[in-house]
Amino acid sequence: MARDVWVLHGPNLGILGRREPRLYGKVSLASIDRVIVELGQELGLNVATFQTNHEGALVDRLTVAMDEVDGCLLNPAALSHGSLALADTLRSMTIPVVEVHLTNLYARERDRQISLTGGAVAGVIMGFGPASYELGLHALAAMIAPAKARRKRT
Ligand code: DQA
């Protein structure tokens, strides 16, 4: 049985490719999404992707994800460093969430070296550019038991 996964991208990731290419590269988010959906097919995962610039929209998506899918891959972007609300949501999750970052946060400015969300997820992969998403999806696939039934609230 194929498992369902949401890949969630936070603020400013919609302009990848045009945004500080020296840091984040020239690959667009659409291209990352295409690769990750194809990789999902190879791993037996139905992948749907979503990008938002809004903290509350991510909180809402993650809350719904618990009822709808088997796991999430999340790049919270700048919200990683400042959103207690998102960290609280992640701590409440009943499905695995893997956090990914294109850049290595430990090699960035001091304020980016702290991820409030990183301590609230199953694990974090960072620093490999778009490949962070691929590595993260492999990690997530390994965490989701094949036969696990979708969690539905009763
Ligand atoms: C990022 C790192 C964040 O510090 C930054 O705000 C981003 C992208 C990354 O993928 O490297 O928007 O999450």
Image: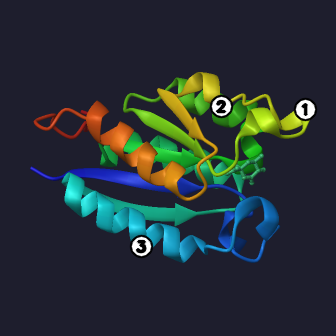
Tell me the distance, in whole angstroms, between the alpha carbons under discs 1 and 2: 16 Å
Write down the residue under mark 3. 34
Write down the residue under mark 2. 117
Residue drawn at (27%, 52%) of the image? 4
Q: In this view, does 22 lie to the left or right of 110?
A: left
Of helix, strand and loop, which one carries label 3? helix
Residue 85 versus residue 12 in the image, above or below: above
- What kind of colouring is applied to the model shown? rainbow
Which label sits in the foreground, 1 or 2?
Answer: 1
Mark 3, Cα crowd under 10 Å, few <14 / some 14-19 / many 20+, is: some
Of helix, strand and loop, which one carries label 1? helix
Three-letter amino acid code of the residue under disc 1: Arg
Q: Are marks 1 and 2 in contact (CB under 8 Å)?
A: no
- How far from the left and from the top, in percent, is residue 51? 59, 64
Residue drawn at (74%, 44%) of the image? 79
Residue drawn at (58%, 32%) of the image? 89
Three-letter amino acid code of the residue under disc 2: Thr
Three-letter amino acid code of the residue under disc 3: Arg
Q: Is the CB–ligand 1 distance for label 2 below 8 Å?
A: no
Q: Is the CB–ligand 1 distance for label 1 below 8 Å?
A: no
Name the N-terminal-most of marks 1 and 2: 1
Q: Do the residues labelled 3 and 2 touch (CB within 8 Å)?
A: no
Tell me the distance, in whole angstroms, between the alpha carbons under discs 3 and 1: 33 Å
- How far from the left and from the top, in percent, is residue 9? 59, 57
Tell me the distance, in whole angstroms, between the alpha carbons under discs 3 and 2: 26 Å
- How far from the left and from the top, in percent, is residue 120? 58, 24
Write down the residue under mark 1. 110
Name the N-terminal-most of marks 3 and 1: 3
- How far from the left and from the top, in percent, is residue 41? 23, 62
